[in-house]
Image (cartoon, rainbow, N blue to C red):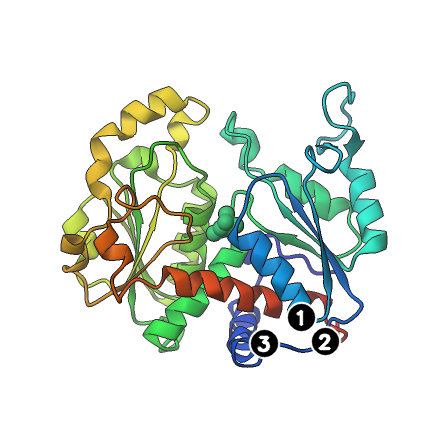
Amino acid sequence: MKHFLSTIDWSRESLQEIIDQAAQLRTSPLNDRLRGKSIALLFLNPSLRTRSSFEIGAFQLGAHAVVLEPGKAAWGIEFETGVVMDGDAEEHITEVAGVLSRYCDAIALRAFPLFKDWSVDREDRVIRALAKHASVPVINMETIVHPCQELALMRTIQDNLGPPAGARYGKKFVLTWTWHPKPLNTAVANSALLIATKFGLDTTLLIPEEAYLLDQQFMQAAEEQAKATGASFEVTTDITEAYSGADFVYAKSWGALSHYGQPEHEAALRAPYKHFMVDEEKMALTNQAKFSHCLPLRRNIKATDGVMDADYCVAIDEAENRLHVQKALMLSLLGSDQ
Ligand code: CP
């Protein structure tokens, strides 16, 4: 049985099939290919885009989505093995996964890291526990990676830059860190690196200082994937160098892993770096690049109004593409030919 936990486990060809089918579904959005099927959407954290696009996407394919919010309108879940469950959680993932696997044809989960100990959170234990105990495909709706966002990003890149020239895409992609009042999840940044390098984009990671490097498992995967395609993968703290000649600029804020679980200290570390905000002057350095962000985005904190309202901003298109790629993913995992 195939899960969709991380694009690391998926070939570029398989991902491209989903991205291609997403374009077809954009043209012809309604069909009955999942009639009678059900998907459980488990949200341990808030969402606007992911929840809407999965629910509506399932509906447009004739399927039913049931949304569950463990700890709110559903029982709290314990994900660790062998613990004495004398805390808030009322049931264990073993039973949750077993029961939902009897009702549904797939289970999707959003479970952000706990922001206490990165050595624990980096193992992505929650979704791996679900995948271990489920007997239907499991879809990651954001943990320490956000693979559905990756699909939408790559659909958007190909919509705007054209298809890859070959194993090496032949375009420059910049992932820039931006300031934010809180130390946010690294998931989208990890994922942006994974998908850009898998598809052979010449990738530049722009960070204010070394503390904002991403976890070694993603840095290493990015290096290896870039090497396999013949593309470059560079890290820089030089804003001008990063933006110069860029074809696609992607912004995200994340907390320094060296200060994980210490938000006050992390805030002091990031305080000098508000100027990493994406603005019109920086975008003018690029090769008439498109700009995007996964959303939600705080205007005039991560990117200026001028950037967000510019013709080159494709963030809304990327959000729309969430719908199309997730429908293609559900067809791939739940379709009758599986
Ligand atoms: N980009 C994204 O996943 O948005 P939501 O958090 O609103 O689902």
Which callout, 3 or 2, points to the residue nearer the camera? 3
- 102 over 286 or under it: above or below: above
Which callout, 2 or 1, points to the residue nearer the camera? 2
Residues at marks 2 and 1, CA–CA distance in whole angstroms: 8 Å
Callout 1 amino acid? Leu
Residue indicated by mark 1:
331
Would you call the spot at circle 2 few (<14 residues within 10 Å), some (14-19), or many (20 or more)? some
Q: Secondary structure at mark 2?
A: loop
Q: Residue at x 50, y 29 (%)?
A: 115
Q: Secondary structure at mark 1?
A: helix
Number of residue marks: 3
Residue 134: image tag: none
Callout 2 amino acid? Arg
Would you call the spot at circle 3 few (<14 residues within 10 Å), some (14-19), or many (20 or more)? some
Assess whether mark 1 and mark 2 are in contact (beta carbons under 8 angstroms): yes
Q: Which residue occupies the foreground of this view, 219 or 246? A: 246
In the displayed structure image, the side of residue 99 where residue 266 appears, left or right: left
Residue indicated by mark 3:
29
Residues at marks 3 and 1, CA–CA distance in whole angstroms: 12 Å
Callout 3 amino acid? Pro
Q: Secondary structure at mark 3?
A: loop
Task: Decide if ligand 1 comes within 8 Å of the CB at mark 3.
Answer: no
Residue 219 in percent (x, y) is at 40, 47
Q: Earlier in the sequence, mark 3 or mark 1?
A: 3
Residue 33: image tag: 2
